Image (cartoon, rainbow, N blue to C red):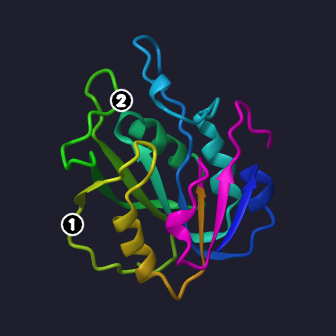
Amino acid sequence: MNYIKSDYAKYIRKMDHKDYSFIDPPWLLDDSPPKVMGQLDYLLWHDNSLLLPLLGNIDTDVIFLWTIVAILDEVFNLISRQNRFVYKTKVEWVKLTKNKKIHFGTGHWFRNSTECLLVLAKPDIKPIRLQFRNVCFAESSKVKTKKPKKFERKIMNKLLDKKGCYIFCGNDVSKFRDFDIECIDILNKKEVIL
């Protein structure tokens, strides 16, 4: 595993080609009162359109993109504004607490208890065929800002013969130690200079 704490834009321009990448952006939430951002322990993007240069620069075949239900419309709009990757499918993660109860998440209309893992790919790429039956799974992340370890490990185990990359916010790289992937921690800044 190679862990780089970096401005992702500078790093991915010189990144070798990867077969797949997980991206877990620090999405900006529409957070007019009542405030929910105070529940997060990392800084958010100042503008979600920062996804566009990320998709434009990354040299990968398949992207697993984490997002939340509240901004799906905006995310799909951003995906449609670039021409390198197309949407293929999505999986829903029902977030559970460490006591196996449904997580009481952030949100105004509904308290989001799920996150989506969108699968994007270059148009001419053949499916990876991960052979999962579930389009929805429930798992505890134990900590509110971490992604589900067992589910991601299942995918990564299927991709062991492929080169991968994980771009995320935060500094917990323990779940990636068994995998030969690049880990790029998006720097916690208010502004990302491109």
Q: Nearer the viewer, mark 1 or mark 2?
A: 2
Asked whether, in this view, residue 61 is left or right of residue 194, the answer is left
Q: Which residue is drawn at 62% across and 34% down?
A: 45
Q: Can residue 48 be seen in this view?
A: yes
Location of residue 19 by image quarter: bottom right
The residues bearing labels 1 and 2 have C-alpha atoms spaced at a distance of: 25 Å
Q: Nearer the viewer, residue 21 or 39?
A: 39
> In this rendering, is residue 18 above or below 50?
below
Region of the chain picked out in magenta, as a range: 168-194
Q: Could you tell me residue 192's position as x and y percent?
A: 74, 38
Q: Which mark, by number, is residue 106?
A: 2
Q: Could you tell me residue 37's position as x and y percent?
A: 48, 25
Location of residue 117 by image quarter: bottom left
Specify the amino acid type for callout 1: Asn
Q: Which of marks 1 and 2 is nearer the N terminus?
A: 2
Q: Check if mark 1's residue and mark 2's residue have beta carbons within 8 Å.
A: no
Q: Residue at x 79, y 43 (%)?
A: 194
Q: Could you tell me residue 189's position as x and y percent?
A: 71, 35
Q: In which quarter of the image is the N terminus?
A: bottom right
Specify the amino acid type for callout 2: Thr
Q: Residue at x 56, y 55 (%)?
A: 172
Q: Does the magenta stretch include residue 185?
A: yes
Q: Mark 1 points at which residue?
A: 134
Q: Most prominent secondary structure in the magenta stretch?
A: loop
Q: Is mark 2 on a helix, strand or loop?
A: loop
> In this rendering, is residue 52 above or below 21?
above
Q: Could you tell me residue 81's position as x and y percent?
A: 57, 46
Q: Residue furthest front?
A: 99
Q: Which mark, by number, is residue 54?
A: none
Q: Which of 57 and 183 is in front in this view?
A: 183
